[in-house]
Image (spheres, rainbow, N blue to C red):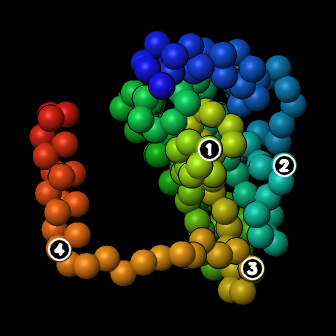
């Protein structure tokens, strides 16, 4: 898909984005946190057995992490940390997952950048560690090299 089609798709998604509607208070939600850049609310279909699964979003619409400006991303992750600490205490969780998906194939079902904060306890039935592989050392070397080269282009 070329850049103009991607931008058009982004605009279409923004106009009908449920997270934008929540952040703009067009829809009711169980608000957890809000500041100038960030909005957080309880997930209406939470993972696991503990209460407190929270979604943390930018107030402005960005489809994913790749097009979220650093200012908004920094505010978002600082809020995630603050909220994760509170969720863990309130839910008496033994641990916390912070999950962020980009693109439908990666599990992102709302095209608006968001982080999930999921309180965890032993044997809660949530499992993310599936279909792992054991790459050859040379693959790791070559992949690391390619990523480093790509990062140099971005600098």
Would you identify the image quadrant in which residue 96 lies? bottom right
* Residue matched to label 3: 125
- Callout 4 crowding tier (Cα within 10 Å): few <14, some 14–19, many ≥20: few
Work out whether mark 3 precedes mark 2 in sequence or the reverse, and give the earlier one. 2
The residue under the point 46% across, 45% down is 78
**In front: label 3 or label 1:** 1
**In front: label 2 or label 1:** 1
Work out whether mark 3 precedes mark 1 in sequence or the reverse, and give the earlier one. 1
- Callout 3 crowding tier (Cα within 10 Å): few <14, some 14–19, many ≥20: few
* Residue matched to label 1: 104
Q: Residue furthest front?
A: 1
Confirm whether residue 33 shows in the render. Answer: no
Q: Position of residue 17 (x, y in %)?
A: 72, 25
Work out whether mark 2 precedes mark 1 in sequence or the reverse, and give the earlier one. 2
Is 11 on the left-hand or right-hand side of 92?
A: left
* Residue matched to label 2: 44
């Amino acid at each position: 898909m070329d850049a103009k089609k991607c931008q058009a798709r982004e605009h279409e998604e923004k106009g009908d984005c449920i997270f934008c509607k929540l952040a703009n208070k067009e829809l009711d939600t169980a608000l957890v946190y809000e500041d100038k850049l960030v909005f957080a609310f309880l997930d209406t279909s939470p993972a696991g057995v503990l209460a407190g699964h929270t979604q943390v979003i930018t107030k402005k619409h960005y489809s994913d992490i790749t097009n979220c400006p650093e200012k908004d991303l920094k505010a978002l992750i600082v809020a995630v940390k603050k909220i994760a600490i509170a969720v863990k205490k309130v839910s008496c969780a033994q641990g916390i997952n912070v999950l962020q998906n980009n693109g439908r194939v990666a599990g992102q079902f709302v095209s608006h950048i968001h982080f999930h904060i999921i309180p965890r306890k032993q044997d809660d039935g949530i499992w993310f560690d599936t279909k792992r592989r054991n790459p050859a050392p040379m693959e790791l070397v070559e992949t690391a090299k390619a990523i480093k080269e790509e990062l140099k282009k971005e600098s």
